[in-house]
Amino acid sequence: MPRLLPHMLLLCLAGLALPAAEGLTRSQAEVAVAAITAERTGELKKERGPEVAAKELKLGDKSLRWLEKEFNLAPEGQRSLWISMHGGGGAPAAVNDQQWKNQIRLYAPAEGIVVAPRAPTNTWNLWHEGHIDPMFARLIDDFIAVRGVHPAKVYLLGYSAGGDGVWQLAPRMPDRFAAAAMMAGHTNGVNTLGVRNLPFAMFVGGADAAYNRNKVVAEKITEFGRLHQEDPEGYEHLGRVYEGLPHWMSLKDAEALPWMAKFTRQAWPKKVIWVQTGVPHHKFYWLQVPADSTKPGQKIVATVKGQAIALTGDVPKGTALRLSDTLLNLDEPVTVSVNGVQVFQGKVPRTEAVIRAALTERLDPQLCPTALLTL
């Protein structure tokens, strides 16, 4: 008799038949996700425990250190994580160190772990250089595996240059966060359409005229208001221009935290707007494109209505849909159109290989696809 892998043994113990050649049932997929998540969590606890204890992770030639504080922690597996990015930027290391050590003192959520990372560089764009995205992805996985953070309760905020980072990272990684808050940062012209499903707060002092921050943030607040009016299920936002206040807002912006805490991450939105900005990504919510097909400004709008998926925009060959029963019913046929032309109709099988690949890449059972359709 062949040796059963742990997750397949769980299927048997759960009274479920082993998967047929055509794919897993929904129940089998749910058990496989839970089993592989537990397996992967155990692996990461052992592998990543030392770097979490040291409060430092390294990728390539870059190092990300952090300070942290705990507030009224929820039970393990339900905790929130607040990533709080410091200001400074293009300045001597000592200036950025001072900003880093001050950042950990600024905000106190009702519950959770606040992490204030030290930017790996001292450049003006310290929070939106290309190494930040994979470092933050690893940091989040570390805290899910080792510290009991819930993947739907990760929040992003930053002040000044850290606010610049929020403007840039939120549209690139919205599926990582439950909400984001930008304090006294400049947009640097970024396209923010990609945060449709990410509640987004914006704060600036009315007298913070450097780089026209006050005017630009006020314009973005108006823009978000218009977008939300046009698309009431998207662009949830909070905007404040504190009249008379300079760059330092005397912590009035701390009102962001209780507002943010009301939200949990939308893992499977029925409508996704993906615009490539800054550092390209090849996965975004339940969409995936070949890594070599991304280009600046590339835009894809994807919607689900019943069992029909419609993609519009610059949809490259090899685009894939990472599907789940949370998004639609995989027991029924799925229809896919690209720019008005039907390109697929049929059932998409759930497979253990898709589940394992997703959880190996990213410890996020909530956003784990069970089926993959390449167009």
Image (spheres, rainbow, N blue to C red):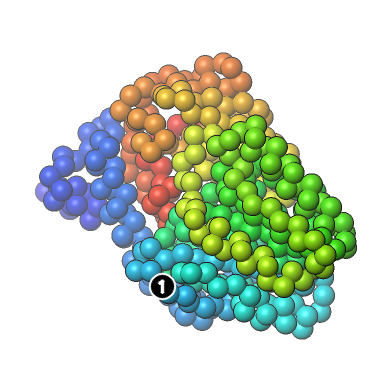
Q: Amino acid at mark 1?
A: Leu
- Residue 122: give x, y in percent of width and height: 76, 72
Crowding around mark 1 (Cα neighbors within 10 Å: few <14, some 14 to 19, many 20+) is some
Instruction: Give the x, y percent position of residue 144.
Output: 43, 64
Q: Nearer the viewer, residue 15 or 72?
A: 72
Residue 111 as seen in the image, left or right of residue 67: left
Q: From what the image shows, is residue 364 above or below residue 334?
A: below
Q: How many marks?
A: 1
Q: Residue at x 64, y 52 (%)?
A: 238
Between 96 and 2, the residue placed more toward the observer is 96
Viewed as shown, does residue 343 lie left or right of 201?
A: left
Q: Closer to the camera, 242 or 60?
A: 242
Q: Which residue is mark 1?
A: 73
- Residue at point 54%, 34% (across, down): 271
Secondary element at tag 1:
loop
What residue lies at 74% left-to-right and 69% top-to-bottom? 249
Tell me the residue at 47%/53% (across/down).
264
